[in-house]
Amino acid sequence: MHLTNKQLQVYEWLKDKLNLPVFAEAYMGAIIQLSEKSAGHISFVSHAGRDLMNILARTVAGITTKQINYVDHVNSIQIYWKDEWNSDGNISQVENSSGHMIPYEICDRICLLIKEHEAAKNRNSGADLLFFSLFLDYSDLEKIPKNFIEDWKTTKRWFQKHTHLRMNHFKPTTMQELPQHFQCLDGFLFVAASSHYERLKELDEILDTANR
């Protein structure tokens, strides 16, 4: 299986110019899996695509993030939780202006969990914008074409939805959708890997295609 000239340029950009060989190998692996359609290729390609979209720009920018440990958060809440608070259908659902009282320790830990979860959501959104500002020369984020952002987010959501293993089979349309979404990511990566002149040309072509 051979990479196209554009894909080879992206691979070399990741491996040599950005000095990220692990990202480069994941990118090449996804292309090979797409071509060979070997067992598990949907999850593998989706995982690689998701990580390229979520982590690449942050890694190049030197931004480190701490993953939320939901298990630790729930464990810290469980320490103060009493069995008699388990609903079993006994908690009143009647509207009450004062609500249901919970101890401060539990409230404090729930607030911390929500705060970290919200911060993670904001980091995800920031990762999208960072790619465009860092690699596509959009210093003014307001000027990023809406279709760019929409295509990027749609593709990332699709990858996230198909990354993890599951009990049930994927939908019949998944096999057709996968190469379409990877092609979208591939296009953005090639534009990012191109020289400034080529980048402007490719961006114009993407805009022309979207406006037809």
Image (spheres, grey):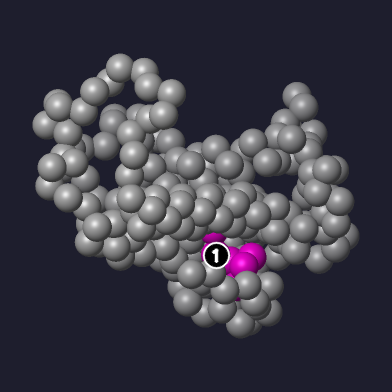
Task: Examine the rendering and report whether any part of residue 186 can be seen.
Answer: no
Left or right: residue 87 compared with residue 207? left
Q: Which residue is mark 1?
A: 55
Left or right: residue 159 compared with residue 187? left
Q: Which part of the image, by quadrant, shows the C terminus?
A: top right
Please say if 29 is above or below 21: above
Q: Is 6 within the magenta?
A: no
Q: Residue furthest top?
A: 94
Residue at coordinates 46% horizontally, 52% vertically from top-left?
A: 111
Q: Nearer the viewer, residue 96 or 6?
A: 96
Horizontal and vertical percent for residue 177?
43, 36
Magenta extent: 53-59
Residue at coordinates 64% horizontally, 65% vertically from top-left?
A: 57
Amino acid on which the number 1 mark rests in the picture: Ile
Q: Nearer the viewer, residue 64 or 159?
A: 64
Task: Examine the rendering and report whether any part of residue 109 can be seen.
Answer: yes
Please say if 43 is above or below 212: below
Q: Nearer the viewer, residue 190 or 144?
A: 144
Q: Which part of the image, by quadrant, shows the N terminus?
A: bottom left
Residue at coordinates 70% horizontally, 52% vertically from top-left?
A: 129
Left or right: residue 23 compared with residue 38? right
Horizontal and vertical percent for residue 22?
47, 77
